[in-house]
């Protein structure tokens, strides 16, 4: 054996320190949102304080509101890969269009470890110009009704969580501000009014069956709406006036024959309908009390006290959309101080079969130029007998982030489940398979290739000691399975690791399912094939080198108790992110470190796994609860036979013949030898004794025909 050059250990410690110092450059303190708001709203004259429910900044230019800004952590604190949310500042205008999104703070290990922070900012730069009502999805194939935005290689889970946080927060804010309606869960296909369905009716009948709806407000209701605002006591009613009528508005869709003909008379109805263009509809408003037209209305302006709400659109009316209604002809109608017909133009895509709302805006003056307003809504549902209403399209249930991720990874999940099933069958029938060494070796090498290529490079399924610390922190605080279910590959591999640690110890994951371990083993197999010399320290030195990985684990664990972010940075002693998540596309110290470990592995099989891997050390702590010991040994193993100990290429067998299951990688080579009469001396000796104790075939000599006993 060639003695190991111990100077290499010092070299790796120095390189590790350099890697950490390079890594630390990516840590940045939380950003102040106010300067960023000034960047997103360069014309703003007043930002004000973050107030309200939900918490937002209201951005003004003079007296005009030009947009809103908010932090995602105030609305949707969704844990990302690190277990902590990514806090972002989001800005929208008064119409609900995204003006910008900026990252304020994150704790993502993938970002801190290798992806430049500029990539994260590039991701959120895709939102300006999109609308809060848009269905946004990270990556994937283009689908109708969904806008797909580019993901971030190596940080898919992180950006998916960021997208959900932005969209959900923006939706909450927009709904609270009345920018979008919360009543848009069901999609009603465009319907058509039955043109020939008419029934003579009086006022009481049409009001009674809901053909004409009523919005009624007394002064108490209006006063209560301004409680807690600057206009709380402006124009407030006395105790005796509280029940007095403030506004009474009747409204209906008047181009429906039964409603229009009864209200307007035949000639007026025909005139109205004949002037409606294709796709246009007419709404009638009749009211007393508070004017729905407004005293400040001037020609060419918008009626600023009323609008129609349907789906995500608010329909306002101008003077050209308005016609004064001189009189109504239906029997039993009350007297109204205001009567108007408003035309809903075709470009609004008004659906006569879908529900809509009349919104009345009530404003109170708090100063010469300042005012505060609130709104009241009345619902309208068109009766079935008036419209041809196609079946409602129920949208697909909104999937949670976890469900979305698992759905997208459906193929990988199935394939990985099959691989795990095959591995478990291999372990259960190992006593049979080891009797076919050529098949078993080829099968194992093929499985390791799949582990490297698919589990490692294609799916990013490389466990890390950081996952252990994240689990411990979650367990000690607010535990949530969603945090761990965000990455199906990692979750399934952790489940496999947990099960196999319970059944067999650390060995199975490290020997079969760890991509970096599999890559090391395959490279070393190639190195032995081309006859590169192998360096093995004496066993006494070797077993002391085992302690290094446990010391590393204890150090990282101590750091994680103080700061998970710091522990994540020092966990760069694992070359996993460089090799598989980032595929060597990162700063040169990380690449040199990973390649250096792989180079040493050519001369010492699985050097990193044996002496430096904190994940392997963490998994080996579960060895004490291992249920089965299926690796067979004989009394002669170790004394006098040392065949398996010499053949074990990671030196997991002690000189006395016992297998150290904390260090074993379950390659099954020792079991191949155990069942091989040609390789196992005790088995060979036992077989010889059996043959000597029982006579074999009897041969008769031709010359004298005397029988002779021949033993093999």
Image: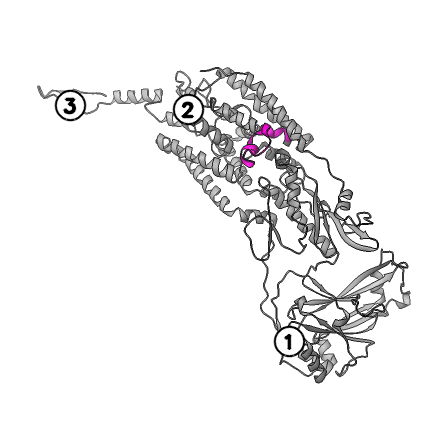
Relative horizontal placement of residue 267, taking residue 643 as reference (left or right): right
Relative horizontal placement of residue 125, taking residue 38 as reference (left or right): left
Nearer to us in this view, 126 or 660? 126
Res. 449 in view: yes
- What colour scheme governs how the chains and residues are painted in the rendered image of this protein? one colour
Quarter of the image for the C terminus: give it. top left
Say whether marks 1 and 3 touch (CB < 8 Å): no
Relative horizontal placement of residue 439, taking residue 155 as reference (left or right): left
Q: Point out the stretch of residues depicted in magenta.
A: 569-590
Q: Earlier in the sequence, mark 2 or mark 3?
A: 2
Q: Earlier in the sequence, mark 1 or mark 3?
A: 1
Q: Which residue is mark 2?
A: 528
Between the residue at mark 1 and the residue at mark 3, the CA separation in whole angstroms equals 108 Å
Question: What is the magenta segment's predominant secondary structure?
Answer: helix
Q: Which residue is mark 1?
A: 386
Nearer to us in this view, 423 or 657? 423
Between the residue at mark 2 and the residue at mark 3, the CA separation in whole angstroms equals 48 Å
**Closer mark to the observer between disc 1 and disc 3:** 1
Q: In the rendered image, which quarter is residue 562 located in?
A: top right
Would you say residue 358 sits in the magenta stretch? no
Mark 3 neighbour class, 10 Å CA radius: few under 14, some 14 to 19, many 20 or more: few
Point out residue 665 in the picture as x, y percentages from the top left corner: 47, 28
């Amino acid at each position: 054996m060639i003695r190991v050059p111990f100077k290499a250990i010092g070299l790796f410690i120095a390189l590790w320190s350099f890697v950490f110092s390079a890594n630390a450059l990516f840590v940045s303190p939380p950003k102040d949102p106010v300067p960023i708001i000034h960047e997103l709203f360069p014309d703003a004259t007043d930002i004000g304080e973050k107030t309200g429910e939900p918490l937002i900044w209201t951005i003004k230019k003079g007296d005009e509101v030009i947009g809103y800004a908010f932090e995602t952590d105030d609305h949707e604190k969704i844990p990302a890969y690190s277990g902590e949310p990514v806090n972002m500042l989001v800005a929208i205008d008064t119409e609900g269009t995204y003006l910008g999104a900026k990252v304020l703070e994150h704790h993502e290990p993938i970002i801190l470890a290798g992806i430049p922070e500029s990539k994260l900012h590039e991701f959120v730069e895709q939102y300006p110009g999109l609308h809060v009502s848009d269905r946004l999805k990270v990556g994937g194939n283009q689908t109708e009704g969904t806008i797909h935005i580019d993901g971030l290689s190596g940080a898919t889970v992180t950006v998916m969580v960021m997208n959900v946080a932005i969209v959900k927060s923006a939706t909450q804010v927009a709904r609270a501000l009345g920018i979008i309606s919360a009543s848009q869960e069901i999609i009603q296909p465009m319907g058509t009014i039955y043109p020939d369905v008419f029934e003579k009716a009086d006022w009481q009948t049409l009001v009674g069956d809901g053909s004409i709806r009523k919005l009624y407000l007394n002064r108490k209701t209006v006063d209560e709406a301004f409680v807690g605002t600057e206009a709380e006591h402006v124009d407030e009613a006395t105790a005796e006036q509280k029940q007095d009528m403030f506004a009474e508005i009747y409204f209906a869709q008047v181009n429906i024959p039964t409603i229009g003909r009864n209200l307007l008379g035949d000639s007026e109805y025909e005139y109205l309908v004949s002037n409606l263009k294709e796709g246009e509809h007419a709404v009638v408003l009749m009211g007393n009390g508070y004017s729905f037209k407004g005293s400040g209305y001037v020609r060419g302006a918008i009626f600023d006290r009323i609008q129609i709400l349907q789906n995500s659109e608010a329909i306002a009316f101008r003077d050209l959309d308005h016609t004064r209604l001189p009189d109504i002809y239906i029997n039993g109608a009350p007297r109204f101080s205001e009567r108007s017909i408003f035309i809903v133009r075709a470009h609004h895509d008004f659906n006569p079969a879908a529900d809509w709302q009349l919104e009345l805006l009530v404003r109170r003056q708090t100063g010469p130029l300042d005012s505060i307003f609130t709104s009241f809504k009345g619902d309208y549902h068109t009766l079935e007998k008036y419209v041809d209403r196609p079946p409602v399209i129920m949208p697909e249930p909104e999937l949670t982030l976890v469900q979305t991720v698992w759905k997208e990874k459906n193929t990988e999940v199935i394939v990985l489940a099959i691989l795990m099933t095959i591995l478990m069958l291999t372990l259960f029938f190992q006593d049979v398979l080891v009797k076919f060494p050529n098949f078993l070796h080829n099968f194992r090498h093929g499985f390791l290739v799949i582990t490297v290529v698919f589990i490692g490079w294609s799916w990013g399924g490389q466990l890390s000691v950081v996952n252990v610390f994240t689990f411990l922190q979650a367990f000690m605080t607010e535990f949530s399975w969603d945090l761990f279910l965000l990455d199906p590959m990692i979750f399934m591999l952790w489940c496999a690791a947990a099960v196999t640690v319970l059944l067999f110890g650390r060995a199975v994951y490290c020997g079969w399912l760890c991509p970096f371990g599999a890559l090391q083993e395959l490279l070393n197999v190639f190195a032995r094939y081309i006859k590169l010399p192998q360096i093995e320290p004496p066993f006494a030195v070797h077993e002391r080198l085992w302690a290094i990985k446990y010391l590393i684990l204890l150090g990282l664990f101590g750091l994680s108790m103080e700061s998970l972010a710091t522990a994540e940075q020092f966990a760069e002693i694992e070359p996993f992110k460089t090799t598989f998540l980032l595929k060597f596309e990162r700063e040169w110290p990380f690449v040199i470190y990973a390649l250096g470990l792989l180079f040493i592995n050519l001369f010492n099989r699985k050097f990193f796994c044996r002496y430096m891997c904190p994940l392997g050390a963490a998994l080996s702590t579960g060895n004490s609860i291992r249920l089965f010991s299926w690796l067979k040994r004989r009394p002669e193993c170790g004394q006098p036979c040392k065949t398996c100990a010499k053949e074990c290429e990671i030196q997991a067998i002690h000189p006395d013949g016992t297998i150290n299951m904390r260090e074993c990688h379950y390659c099954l080579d020792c079991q191949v030898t155990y069942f091989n009469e040609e390789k196992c001396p005790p088995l060979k000796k036992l077989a010889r004794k059996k043959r000597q104790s029982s006579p074999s075939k009897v041969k008769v000599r031709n010359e004298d025909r005397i029988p002779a006993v021949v033993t093999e």
